[in-house]
Image (tube, helix red, strand yellow):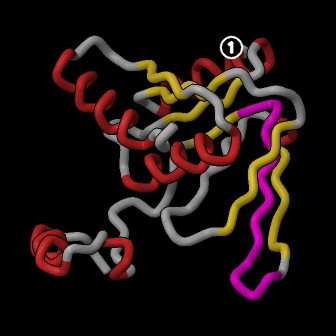
């Protein structure tokens, strides 16, 4: 289903998220890189579908879907933090310059404004790994405040 202003309005009337109506604005989470992260996906029927060692993907990112997935995250070594980068281009540049090799971190390219898929992926990282999440972006104060508000809302209660 294509996301339109009317579908968003319908969700407001029904008091639900558009994803609950199988309506997705962006079908993928942020491009994610890490030398330390392992992701295991389990299908709804219980079969193990895939196992991803992000350290073995080289410069290719892992991108979770914005649809229900059963993902289990595991750290090979202690992960110090997750860095959410505003643009995928900047994230790719950091990867090309060896960021993931020098830091025990998760690096995520957010594709501009944080979509529901990126927010959900940040929440999963926070819930399962309990690592701090930092944001790296431009110096636009209004945009930066909006990003901070969105990321802060992702954090689970302490």
Residue 128 in view in this figure: yes
Residue 125 location (% of width, % of height): 62, 43
User: Which portion, as a residue range, is magenta?
Assistant: 34-46
| Residue 102, quarter of the rendered image | top right
Vertical comparison of 122 with 109: above or below? below
Q: What residue appears at the point 83 percent right and 81 percent down from the top-left corner?
A: 47
Dot 1 alpha-carbon crowd within 10 angstroms: few under 14, some 14 to 19, many 20 or more: few
Say whether residue 108 is left or right of residue 42.
Answer: left
Q: Please say whether residue 57 is one of the residues in the magenta stretch.
A: no
Q: Residue at x 82, y 38 (%)?
A: 75
For residue 1, side relative to residue 62 (left or right) = left
Q: Position of residue 42 (x, y in %)?
A: 77, 72
Q: Quadrant of residue 12?
A: bottom left
Q: How many marks?
A: 1
Above or below 73: residue 41:
below
Question: What secondary structure is found at the residue carrying circle 1?
Answer: loop
Residue 138: image quadrant is top left
| x then y, percent, for residue 98 | 73, 15
Q: Is residue 15 above or below residue 126?
A: below
Residue projecting furthest to the bottom: 45
Magenta-colored stretch includes residue 44: yes
Residue drawn at x 75%, y 50% as measured from the top left: 73
Residue that carries the numbered disc 1 in the rendered image: 97
């Amino acid at each position: 289903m294509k996301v339109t202003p009317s579908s968003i309005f319908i969700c407001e009337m029904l008091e639900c998220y558009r994803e609950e109506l199988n309506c997705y604005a962006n079908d993928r989470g942020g491009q994610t890189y890490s030398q330390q992260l392992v992701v295991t996906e389990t299908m709804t029927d219980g079969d193990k579908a895939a196992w991803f060692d992000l350290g073995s993907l080289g410069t290719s990112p892992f991108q979770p879907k914005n649809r229900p997935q059963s993902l289990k995250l595991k750290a090979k070594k202690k992960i110090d933090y997750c860095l959410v980068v505003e643009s995928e281009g900047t994230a790719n540049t950091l990867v090309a310059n060896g960021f993931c090799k020098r830091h025990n971190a998760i690096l995520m390219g957010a594709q501009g404004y944080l979509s529901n898929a990126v927010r959900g992926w940040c929440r999963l990282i926070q819930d399962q790994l309990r690592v701090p999440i930092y944001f790296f972006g431009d110096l636009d104060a209004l945009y930066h405040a909006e990003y901070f508000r969105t990321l802060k809302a992702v954090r689970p209660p302490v």
